[in-house]
Amino acid sequence: MQRSVFFISDGTAITTETVGHSLLTQFPAVMWRQQRIPFVDNPQKAADAVRQIEAAGERDGVPAIVFLSIIDDATRTVFYSSHAITLDLFEDFLDTIERAVGMTRGGAVGRAHGLADTQRYEDRMEATNYALSHDDGISPSYENADLILVGLSRTGKTPTCLYMALHFGVKAANYPLTPEDLERQRLPTQLRHHRDKIVGLMIDPDRLAQIRDTRRPGSRYASLKQCHWEVDAAESLLRREGITAFATTHSSIEEIASRVLAHLGMQREMY
Amino acid sequence: MQRSVFFISDGTAITTETVGHSLLTQFPAVMWRQQRIPFVDNPQKAADAVRQIEAAGERDGVPAIVFLSIIDDATRTVFYSSHAITLDLFEDFLDTIERAVGMTRGGAVGRAHGLADTQRYEDRMEATNYALSHDDGISPSYENADLILVGLSRTGKTPTCLYMALHFGVKAANYPLTPEDLERQRLPTQLRHHRDKIVGLMIDPDRLAQIRDTRRPGSRYASLKQCHWEVDAAESLLRREGITAFATTHSSIEEIASRVLAHLGMQREMY
């Protein structure tokens, strides 16, 4: 079963698509044919979008589904003329919030991913630069880190740090445990001073071997025996150092980031 | 005016918070006191969350606002016993989609940011590694790039590439125009072969000088005169090469990414 879906917004359509996806994953039997139409900020662009929506519906033989987040009334109402099934992400909720706070909405377009809060945006960019310059143990100092991820090579430290920097403005450094650390069963001195902001990432040895093998096929580095040894040694090291570790084998970077921030009690606003 | 808001989900609560933010930005006069409670996946955790919500409402003297996305009925209905104003992001929309497709929802918890589609997740991680290893002109080859961002130093190329990699699985390389490129008024040979996948990023010279000055205060690199010269030369070079450029001065990385992907006709699903 095929069905056309459109994500339409006066901004980037990123929030709209995110919400749409989380709803569509509840219907895995449907083949969703998805299209994003960003920056629809006047009735003319809305009319163009409606033409695409109607064409898709005619081709499919069933009306398309449209996820909509547009503030301007004149632009939004253009979509109500189409045959599509329209899910308006703003209208009902904004009405409810207006009643709750006793104010009317501001009416600014596309603020969700715009530059509304310049300081917060700059914090995110600075945190991203921080993550890049404190990646993979290259940092001489961890004084300014908000948190430090520690784990074996290929456990997802780098993408998780980048994600936390880009979306939460968190200065996240990461340090890969070396063979020397594992032998000595302790963290390097410059990290031991910061144990309260360190979180460990762990992984199943089988999965680790699989990931490493795609990078260096047949190497000792990727062998199951080596991975088993490293995982055992890393678990024991983190336990001795009193550091909480999260399993990453079945988790996405979003899930890991969410757990790490909750563990450290960091209630940063996300972006 | 202060008001407590909770983002509550059986998964990471990332989607929930994203939607909540885009609605709350419509009420800039309210001081929102925001809290995220992820992984609420049983009635016991829901009851704990309700206690926090009620305490916040009593402290504020007005009921809290709760953005909710929880699939399990027994868990979700716990929230309906609270005094909070609850905006359920799933319920109404899922009902509408069920009617549209003639199927009932699958009922899986927290799929939005889980590892449901392993291949797509691995593509995103591979793209992130690609962006890191093809950052800032360090790449010897651009054969495997999906797209290449070209621009002056400090125009937002790196964070935009990382964002597109993490969220769209796009292999995005970037190349900073050098003084030699600007003097010669042409792109390096290895880039000229890939002009169809190059997009330029431009910026106002005043803003460029401001950004550079926070990195190297008082330097020639950050001087207004130097920035003016570089921006003029870069604009002229990109025009000669027939490359479309986007202004980044008043745009967030999400907006730039959205425009770049639309320009290249890349309808990648976002994540």
Image (cartoon, coloured by chain):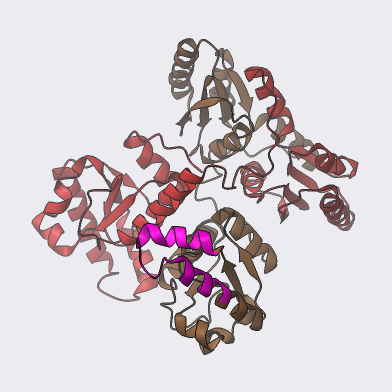
Chain colours: A red, B brown
Q: Is residue A145 above or below residue A214?
A: above
Q: Residue at x 44, y 13 (%)?
A: B55
Lateral position of residue A184 relative to residue A224, left or right: left
Q: Is residue B74 visible?
A: yes
Q: Quadrant of residue B98?
A: top right
Name the image quarter holding the N terminus of chain B.
top right
Q: Nearer the viewer, residue A255 or A158?
A: A158
- Say if the magenta span includes residue A209: no
Question: Measured from the top left, where is residue A127 in percent x and y?
Answer: 39, 51
Question: Measured from the top left, where is residue B251 in percent x and y?
Answer: 59, 54
Identify the residue at the far left of this view. A184
Instruction: Count up the numbered dots.
Output: 0
Q: Is residue A40 above or below residue B57?
A: below
Lateral position of residue B90 relative to residue B161, left or right: right
Q: Residue at x 82, y 43 (%)?
A: A75
Lateral position of residue B266 relative to residue A49, left or right: left
Q: Residue at x 32, y 61 (%)?
A: A133
Q: Residue at x 48, y 39 (%)?
A: B12
Question: Measured from the top left, where is residue A118 in percent x and y?
Answer: 51, 46
Magenta segment's dominant SS is helix
Q: Which residues are magenta?
A: B205-232
Q: Nearer the viewer, residue A161 or B149?
A: B149
Question: Measured from the top left, where is residue A64 in percent x and y?
Answer: 81, 49
Q: Is residue B119 visible?
A: no
Q: Nearer the viewer, residue B126 or B67?
A: B67
Q: Quadrant of residue B29?
A: top right
- Say if the magenta span includes residue B208: yes
